[in-house]
Image: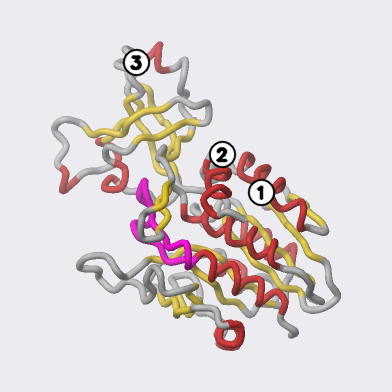
Amino acid sequence: MDILKTLNTLNACFGPSGREDEVREAIKKLAKPFADEMKTDAMGNLYVRKKGNGAKVMFSAHMDSIGVIATVVEDEGFIRFGRVGGISPATLLSSTVRFANGTRGVVQKNEDAKLDKLTLQEMYIDIGVANKEEALKHVQPGDMAVYDAPSFLTPGGMIVSPYLDDRICCVAQLMALEKLKKTDNDVWFVFTVQEEVGLRGAKTAGYIVDPDYFVVCDVTWSDDTPKAEHFASSVTGKGAAIKIMDGSVIAHPQVVKLLNDIAKQKKIKVQQDVLKGGGTDAGAIHVSRAGVPSSGVSVPIRYCHYAQEMAALSDVEDTAKLLAAFAENKF
């Protein structure tokens, strides 16, 4: 499976939190050749299953991205907005965004707004129309928008793209599904909704699957940019990052050990993922029902939640290999 091509297929879809339908349908088409069963729940989570009689093993990657939501259209045609997920003025300023109907605009600030104290209330989207009447033909209050930016490969083997959080891990799960040839386990690759606004889809998914083991596949911060504050332990290009802890979960030590043992046995390049904050679907699923032994396999990325994020292709490949190997393990 070609990483950039598959990522671009998913990125062409519109999919902020709560509006993941297009992404889900694209994933269903990509997963169909490798799945024994697929279903969707009332929340919109997608379950892709490889049936078996052994341990019930669950993976998840979330389909939703961060975004903004239109709140007020001003007389001059400028659009005020709120946040959908973890978005900040610094990440938004001068970014281009697109709405579900294809309308595009640029995010800017009030002329008198100070950069060092900028708030979302001082920002607006300019879609290039003359007045409110024209703007309302294209955007209504309640319409969501996401970053509008290209994806490309760098000379150093890095992929640059919007929504790597978490579309790149949706790709990794699809790659793992493709690699998974034979297993006695009952394996569930779940693609969840509304992670960016509170792990909401994961709460439902964990209850439905009720797994014996859970491994989240999400991105993590990379600690390799200039003057990095050591918020995280992993870096781009050093392999799949095995989750130890983040702001939502302390990983089960036996699952962490098992992932490391499998990586060593299969000669998969790995590193350890300790994150001082943030969170993933594991935060909801490890406390689901009677509790689930949980960890994660993360793809380190630079510039998380900015319009353009960056990851190493090799880390994505290692992540997919480790997920598939864990699915094949005899528990």
Q: Nearer the viewer, residue 136 or 321?
A: 321
Q: Which residue is mark 2?
A: 13
Q: Which residues are magenta?
A: 299-315
Which of the marked residues, 2 or 1, is nearer the chain's N terminus?
A: 2
Residue at 41% x, 77% y: name it: 274
In the figure, is residue 301 to the left or right of 16? left
Crowd class of label 3 (few under 14; some 14 to 19; many from 20; radius 10 Å): some
Q: Residues within 10 Å of mark 2 (few under 14, many from 20)?
A: some
234 or 19, nearer to the observer: 234
Q: Residue at x 36, y 23 (%)?
A: 127
Q: Secondary structure at mark 2?
A: loop
Name the image quarter holding the C terminus: bottom right
The residue depicted at 74 percent of the width and 50 percent of the height is 40
Is label 3 in contact with label 2 (beta carbons under 8 Å)?
Answer: no
Alpha carbon separation for disc pair 2 and 1: 10 Å
Q: Residue at left 27%, top 65%? A: 225
Measure how far apart labels 3 and 2 are at the Cα level. Answer: 25 Å
Residue in front for this viewpoint, 214 or 182: 182
Counting from the top left corner in percent of width and height, residue 132 is at 37, 15
- Residue 16's x, y, as percent? 51, 43
Where residue 129 is drawn, which disc sits there?
3
Image position of 135 with respect to 258: above or below = above
Q: Position of residue 155 (x, y in %)?
A: 36, 56
Q: Secondary structure at mark 3?
A: loop
Q: Closer to the N terminus: mark 3 or mark 2?
A: 2
Residue type indicated by callout 1: Ile
Q: Amino acid type of disc 3?
A: Val
Residue 322: horizontal and vertical position, in percent? 59, 74
- The residue identified by callout 1 is 27
